[in-house]
Every structure is written in C-alpha cells, then in structure tokens.
Image (cartoon, rainbow, N blue to C red):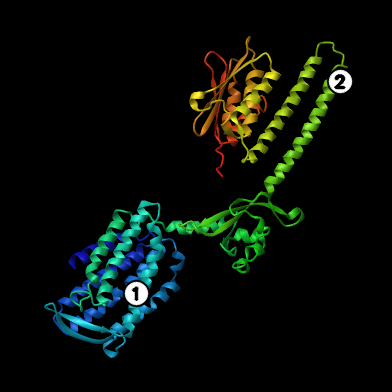
Amino acid sequence: MLLTVVVGTTAALLAWRERREPGAVPLTAMLAGQVWWSVFFVLEHRAGTFARKVLYSDIQWLGVVVIPVAWLLFALEYTGRDHYVRPRYVALLSVVPVVTVALAATDPYHDLLYLDTELVTEAGRTVLRRVGGPWYWVVTGYTYLLGLLGSIPLLGLVRSDSVPFRGQSLGLLVGTLAPWASNVLFLAGAVPVPSLDPTPVFFAVSGVAYLGAITRFRLLGTSPSANHRARQLVFERMREGAVVVDRHDYVVDMNEQAAEILGVDPRDALGSPAAEVIPRYEHLPEEGRASRHLTLGEGLQSRQYDATVTAVADFHGRSLGGVVSFHDVSDHLRRQQRLEVLNRVLRHNIRTETNLIYGNADLIDAEGGHVEAVKEGAMRIEAISDKARDVIDIFERGRQSERSLTLRAVIRECIEAVREDHPSVEIDLEFDRSGGCADGAEIAISPVLSSVVKNVVENAAEHNDAADPWVGVRATCTEEAVEIRVADNGPGISDHERAALERGNETPLDHGSGLGLWLIAWGTEMVDGDLTIDDREGGGTVVTVGVPQIVPERK
C-alpha cells in the first residue's frame, strides 16, 4: 500500500506539472482520487476501534466517486472530444457522486448506502464487513458505466498507426482495468478475504501503467486530442461540399458548404433519400468522378461542379456508404472557354494577316531587298501562332488522363515530322534495350509527350547551324519511368532563356525567344516529369525529359 501511494502521488505530480496539456487536470484528479482511497484504506485497517474504521471507510467514498468521473473527462479531453467537457455536463456527471458523498456522511441515519455494518474476523484479521444498500448498487453501476464510456474512445487508439498513441492508450487501459477487475472479483466474493476490497492494492498497477504512459510514451507531451477536432474541422470548413450517405442511400451528414451548394437545410436533409437531395444522384458512379459536370442554378448564376464519390468501408471490407464531394469548377470552365475563344480568334486573325502580308510582299517595290525580310517576319508570326496552338493542345491532352500512347509511336512520329521539315539534319534514334525499352512498343506514356518530344527535337534541328547538323535521340526505360535524351551539336541554349525557365516567368529584360521552351517545360510538369538542360561535351545541348510510365489498369 505504501508503494501504491508513492507511485500514485508521483504520477499525479507529473500530470499536474503538465496541467496545460489536454486531459492533464482530469488525470491528476483521478490519480489523486486513487491516492485518497488508498490512504484511508490503510487507515481503516490500521484503526483500532469500530467507530474509526467506519469513519475512514466513509471518507474513502470521496476518492471512490472522483475516479470514474475524472476518468471519463480525461478520455474525452485526451481524444479531442472536449466539447463535452463543459460545466453543465460536469455538473450533471457529478450528481451521483455528490449524493453518494452526502449519504456516506449521513450513513448512521439511513440504510440507503449500507444495510449493515459489523466487525468480523477473516484470515486472522479483524475487518469491517459492510452490506451494500440500494444506493450502493446504484453508484457501483454508475461507476462501471462511466468506466466503460471512458474506455471506448481509447480503444480506437489501440489500432492507431502511431506507436506513441498505441502505447499511451494501452497503458491507460491496463491501468484502469487492473483495479476494476479486482473490484469485480470482490463484488463476486472471489477474493481470499471476502470483506477486504483489494481494489486499492491494485492501484499500484495503475500507477505504474500511468507512469509508463507519461514518461515512456509521452502521454501529456504527444496527444491525439487534435486529431478528432481537426478532422471534424476539415469536414465542416473544407471549401468543397461533402455529403455522407449510408449504404442504403440516405443522407446521414453534410457540411455547411454542401448545404449552401445544394440549397437545403441540413436539418431537413439528414435522413432523407440522397436522390431527393443530390441532383442526378442515380447517375453518380459507385466510386470515382462523375463523367459529366453537375450544373446547379439557372442562367448567369448557374455553377458547375465536379462530383466525386469516395466509397467508405469497414475493416472487413463491407460497404458502409460513401462521401459525395462537390468541387466548384465554374471559374475554371469559364477561363477555359475564354482561352479557347481567344485562341481561335488570334489564330484566325494572325493567319489572315500573315497571308495578306506574305501575298502583298511580292507587289511591293523590292528595291533594297527587304521583301524577303517581310516574308520571314510573317512566317515567324505564323510559327508563334502554331506554338500557341500546341500549348493549348497539351493543356487539353493533360485533362484526358485516361489516355496513353506508346513510347515508340510518340518518338517515331515526332522524328518523322522533324525530318520532313529539316531534311538536311541527321537524326539518330536509339532505344536502350538494356533498360527494358526494347523498341518502345510496350511502354505507355502520356499523350502530352507528343508535343513535348516534337518540340525538343524540332528546336535541336531548327536552330542547329553546324556544318553537319546532327540530333541524337535516346530512350531509356526503368520499371516505372522513361527517360528521353535529345542531344545536338548546335549553338546551345542561351543563359537568359534558361534563367527564365528556372524562375518560372519572364521579365521585360529577361525573356525567352518564343513559346517552344515553355511548351516543353509546361508539358513535362503536367505529367509529373523532370526536365534538365545541360551543355554537351564538344558543343551543343543535351535536353533530358524524364516521365513516369502509365501502368494500364487490370480488369
């Protein structure tokens, strides 16, 4: 019993020292209750008179009733359910304990707490035997009820991926179950001395378990209290609307954003069939993104949403329902429409004007030889227009993530197109068979790479002013990625163009010569790839594009 008091007091002092941490104050109260019970338990059995034994036995109730209330409050604070730890709830939980203490103080005047009290000799010791009255069993049941309710949220942490949280929760549960198990045995009469409640003795086990949780697993230093509240806040305040439906397609929860999007009152929607709350619900997939945008509202006030269904299952894989989320894509779609209109207008007008310039250049008095310069300028304008079209194309292909092309088809198509436009440039192609590429026919990559590779090879050929222009294309594969290396013997890429790419934007004094390099950089970024530009030994440039392979889904 001395060990019980020392260990319990030490744990209580450590808990009080961290009283600013969630759960520290209730834990201190619970440990103090155990120490209180243990001290007066010793005094009861050391007392030499019947009256003093009864007095110390009644005083023990103050510690007895504090323990279950403090345990529940600790579990709620520790696991982030502190919104239940409010004065009115604490007062409600304290009704039974206060009545119990009052009945213990007035025990000689009624039989509610004890029906009979007498001294008996058991196992050679004189002990106090007390027969419980009606309220004794009420407070006993209440104690076990609070103990169970406090243990439930901790049981969820036993399966946590965090080792400290698992250790903390196991230590707490062991520390709680040990004295309660001994109390059950006492109530069942299965202890060596039937009139001697061994529960305070087992508080030594509790104290050691709590000390281990506090010191070894940082009980009050690493707390999961933020997890529960944070997840609740994420759901309630996320910018996307979210509706939770059960396996029978009834709405069981929704956040404020979803209520605003759908134009419903959550109090009316909860418990209603999902088809009555969510438009086109019957067309949503069991899991994944809907094939069509969901349009809500009318006219200029309408909004478009991407609807996505996330299936929810239990640990056995059985379906529990799902979460339908709504992501507002109205602004994105409108920007896309504006860009497409702008692209079409610019392309049409630029092509018309360049054709007009080019056609009328022959009618100009060619004195001074400026006609060819005019024609070349017109063709450069048209080339920029074509690059802008290619940029729009890669953005469009990037949205079609389900499509794929083979590595061989992409590279061969690009090389053939460049060879046709630049017949004087020698272009070599090599597939690194040692890396698993073979001829690239079995390697799937994003269609965005068509424009990227074509522009890399085209830039290497178009700007190559060597006497014998050459471009080498080499493809290397690993199990998950593809690396396409394009080398040339041309003049190289200027420092100011590389600086613009590294910075991510252009300035009036530091900009690239066109859209080609930006197209390569943006396209590689869209497929989660890496782009490196290095100087080639002996002159020229080496551009390397590394991208992940697309693994086809198994059906």
* Residue 388 lies in quadrant: top right
Question: 525 or 438: nearer the eye?
Answer: 438
Mark 1–mark 2 Cα distance, whole angstroms, equals 99 Å
Disc nearer the start of the sequence (1/2): 1
Residue 269 located left or right of residue 20: right
Q: Type of residue at label 1? A: Thr
Question: In what quadrant of the picture does the N terminus appear?
Answer: bottom left
SS at mark 1? Answer: helix
- How far from the left and from the top, in percent, is residue 465? 64, 13
* Residue 520 appears in the picture as rendered: yes
Residue at the location (22% across, 86% down)?
A: 117
Residue 541 located left or right of residue 328: left
SS at mark 2? Answer: helix
- How far from the left and from the top, in percent, is residue 253? 57, 63
Query: Mark 1 highlights which residue?
Result: 143
User: Could you say which disc has been placed on residue 76 in the image?
Assistant: none
Question: 286 or 361: nearer the eye?
Answer: 286
User: Could you say which disc has been placed on residue 360 in the image?
Assistant: 2
Q: Is residue 366 above or below residue 62?
A: above
Q: Type of residue at label 2? A: Asn
Q: Is residue 295 above or below residue 85?
A: above
